[in-house]
Image: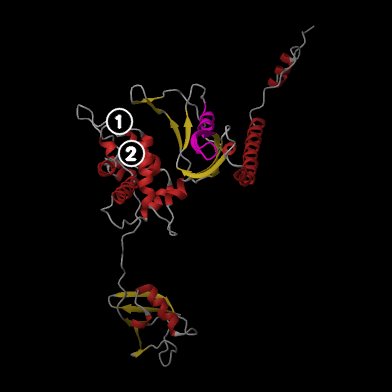
Amino acid sequence: MKVNVKWGKEVFSDVDLDTTQPPMVFKSQLFTLSGVPPDRQKVLIKGGQLKDDEWGKQQPKDGMTIMMMGSADEIKVEAPTNAPKFVEDLPEEEQNTLETKAYGSGLKNLGNTCYMNSTLQCLYSAEGLKQALQTYQASALSEPNAKLAQAARELFAELQRGGEPLSPFKFLLTMRQRFPQFAQQTNEGLYMQQDAEECWTQVMYALKEQLKDADGKSAVDRLFGLKLHTKLKCEETGEEFEEDSTVYTLKCNISVDVNYLHQGVALALVEDREKNSAQADRLVLFKGSAKIAELPPYLTVQLVRFFYKVDVRQKAKILRKVTFPMEFDVYDYCTPELQKQLAAPRLALKDYQDKVALERRSAKHLKAEDGPKPAPVLDAGSSSSAAAAAAGDVDMKDAD
């Protein structure tokens, strides 16, 4: 049956009502229409109040009007928490840096500070170091290394927000306080140019003392530590010497014979060292080389371009061009033990690369086959007749 329901000033006409169903079904229907929850509804039929579980004496009839009282729930309309942002609505400075925001902000040159900026940008690219700085809490900011680590933490947080290039004043002042050599000035009062490798080394060792993992070990060692195993032998006495060390850069020495990165790395791993001999009881020359015993997640390669000229007592820069690849394979410089560990992953990588190359060749071959077909070449003698036949023309004989 259909009934009418009057609720205040509103009237709901032709509301379906089935008395074979419990009254709660009808009340739920009224909740949908009015927004009044069933527990707040007071439904009156012929002066009596309708219950939730039975109709009782309140038997409705087709077309009758039923009274309902009760207040509806307040509908709260909230603004979306993740409202879409359109490029046109962003400030102009953010629009200009939108495409590069994923890579972080740039750093402004504060006067011969390109060495520091390049070092910081290089360190910023190491995701593991950013995570270590995010969780860093200085125990005592009075300690110089702690001040530098805190300044790096704040600067990296600003870089991650993206946008216009930043002026790293705080980090620069903190670094000059910790390492006064970077505050050297010319006679004109301008700050002198510095070596990026020296900046890298000093900052790296300062962070090493501050950034610790949960087990108390250095996060810098875990991320950048390159372990070398060195073997030296004295040809004069036959003595042998071995040692293990941890460095943070794989050096590439540059000589007149070095044109490629792998040549300079091989040259740098060769070592001649004077050491006191127990047999000769004096300094003797030990010769040998170093091998990589353990690789870090982030391998830093340094092109050694500066050397000290004794005659003029000044640093000089090597300008020789050294070609380097986008992917550098250090397998040949590793110890036999490490080479054994790398054998299986290298084979898996080669198989994957071969598979990708094969798929690309197959796709290129299929694309060539699916391309436009060349036009058929017709015989010269039949070309005119074939063309005429194709056009629907018929040769006509001469009339008698």
- Above-or-below relation of 287 to 295: above
Q: Position of residue 255 (x, y in %)?
A: 48, 24
Occupied quadrant, residue 186:
top left
Q: Which residues are magenta?
A: 260-286
Q: Secondary structure at mark 2?
A: loop
Quote the CA–CA distance across marks 2 and 1. Answer: 20 Å
Read off the residue under disc 2.
106
Mark 1 sits on what residue? Answer: 193
In the image, residue 278 lies at what x, y percent? 53, 40
Q: As shown in the figure, which amino acid type bears the numbered disc 2?
A: Gly
Q: Amino acid at mark 1?
A: Gln
Q: How many marks on residues?
A: 2
Q: Is residue 99 something that shows in the picture?
A: no
Q: Is residue 278 magenta?
A: yes
The x, y position of residue 207, in whole percent, is 37, 48
**Res 98 → quadrant:** top left
Return the residue nearer the eye: 171 or 79: 171
Q: Residue at x 43, y 80 (%)?
A: 26
Front: mark 2 or 1: 1
Which of pointers 2 and 1 lies earlier in the amino acid sequence? 2
